[in-house]
Amino acid sequence: MIRFFSYSRFTTFLLLCSSLLYLSRLPLLPARIIPDAVTVIPETQNATWHNFVRLIDAGKGSQLSGVADLKRYFHRFGYLEGTNFSSFGSSGSNLNFSDLFDGQLESAVLSYQRNLGLTVTGKLDSATVSAIMSPRCGVADSASPPSPSKLHATKRFAYFYGRPRWQRGSDGDGDGETMTLTYAFSPDHRVGYLSAKDVRRVFRRAFDRWSAAIPVSFRESEEYGSADIKIGWYRGDHGDGEAFDGVLGVLAHAFSPENGRLHLDAAETWAAADDFDGVTSRVAVDLESVATHEIGHVLGLAHSSVKEAVMYPSLSPRMKKVELKVDDVEGIQALYGSNPNFKFNSLLASENSSNSHGVGMTGVRRSSAAWNHFALLVCLSGMLLSCI
Ligand SMILES: [Zn+2]
Ligand SMILES: [Zn+2]
């Protein structure tokens, strides 16, 4: 017993030290507070997903409190069919899942790990639980394979079922003819602390990145009702069957072509600055990164398993990921064709250069991993303390 207690306390001490080490690596921030309807945000995890840390190391045959919640999570994001033949993707809150880690859950974990580019083990290892707890897009990951063609067999972008794309203003044959789509911001569903000027600048840049790659241009319209793409911030259940869940967790969602709705969770602390230097919140979410990702959905891309791609489903707080990667560009150009001015070789060269020199997207990966490890360490330390 004595040895057990000593070991536990030592482990706790080590974990706390590690947590403090990570904390010390977070940038020191000047005292500027984002005015926000949600002014007190003590958590750094979504309340429900935070509990998944208790499931680390669970595998097939485990019976643990919380497994049913994990099944609801996998049901929501397209990995697990509900009881009574319910469809994928609904919130699943009233579905009767058991706490047994069964074969179906193992299959769900396997395909989740494949889709998120994780090591495929079928078990809830710490990397998998960390990914599950990360803030993410609300669009389900289930998607049709990129293409039956062998040409695309190794690509990891994906489309919605049926490969829908916008047809308006185009003959739809992907021959390079330019189409124009309009977008507008909801006059009623905004967040007060973001200026209209900042929001417009951020979305303009996000749209420009996609239109640089494909022969589609985007024009802001004052006519919200008739715009092709309708952008707004919403809270909780807002009538489209995809309720938002408060701080972190699901950050935003958008609908496949030619629906055009792009919704952001009003409960997040959105940051519209060029960097995070003046942003104090540890749960701040970069608007431009999320806007770029959701526009990808509006245009017809589903989630990618390439971690560096804009269309990867999760995004850590305080992370900026706005540049389209080769995977994003190949995916969108297969739907719409290429913008005649787009230089694919330049993108390829810059991506290769980033890889070999350890900057660019490698930096994104490192920052993401650091955040995830930090979150896990804090959670584990708390759990160990409560056990001693
Ligand atoms: Zn998404
Ligand atoms: Zn919505």
Image (spheres, rainbow, N blue to C red):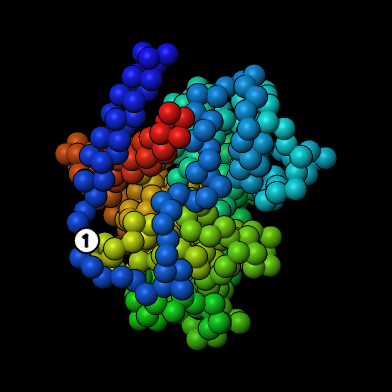
Mark 1 lies on a secondary structure that is loop
Can the viewer see residue 250 in this picture?
Answer: yes
Residue 154's image quarter? top left
- Closer-to-camera residue (21/385): 385
Q: Is residue 241 left or right of residue 257?
A: right
Note whether 306 is above or below 298 in the view shown.
above
Q: Position of residue 211 (x, y in %)?
A: 40, 65
- x 29%, y 39%: residue: 19
- x 34%, y 71%: residue: 34
Which residue is denoted by mark 1 in the rendering?
29
Q: Position of residue 107 (x, y in %)?
A: 62, 27
Q: Mark 1 vs ligand 1: CB under 8 Å?
A: no
Residue 12's image quarter? top left
- Closer-to-camera residue (355/246): 246
Instruction: Identify the image quadrant of the C terminus.
Output: top left
Give amino acid for label 1. Leu
Note whether 356 is above or below 233 in the view shown.
above
- x 61%, y 43%: residue: 73
Q: Is residue 349 left or right of residue 80?
A: left
- x 54%, y 30%: residue: 55
Report the label total.
1
Q: Position of residue 283 (x, y in %)?
A: 38, 57
Which residue is situated farthest in the front direction here? 2
Instruction: Identify the image quadrant of the N terminus.
Output: top left
Q: Is residue 25 left or right of residue 41?
A: left
Residue 75's image quarter? top right
- Closer-to-camera residue (346/240): 240
Q: Is residue 249 left or right of residue 95?
A: left
Residue neighbourhood size for the residue with mark 1, other residues' Cα within 10 Å, grouped as few (<14), some (14–19), many (≥20): few
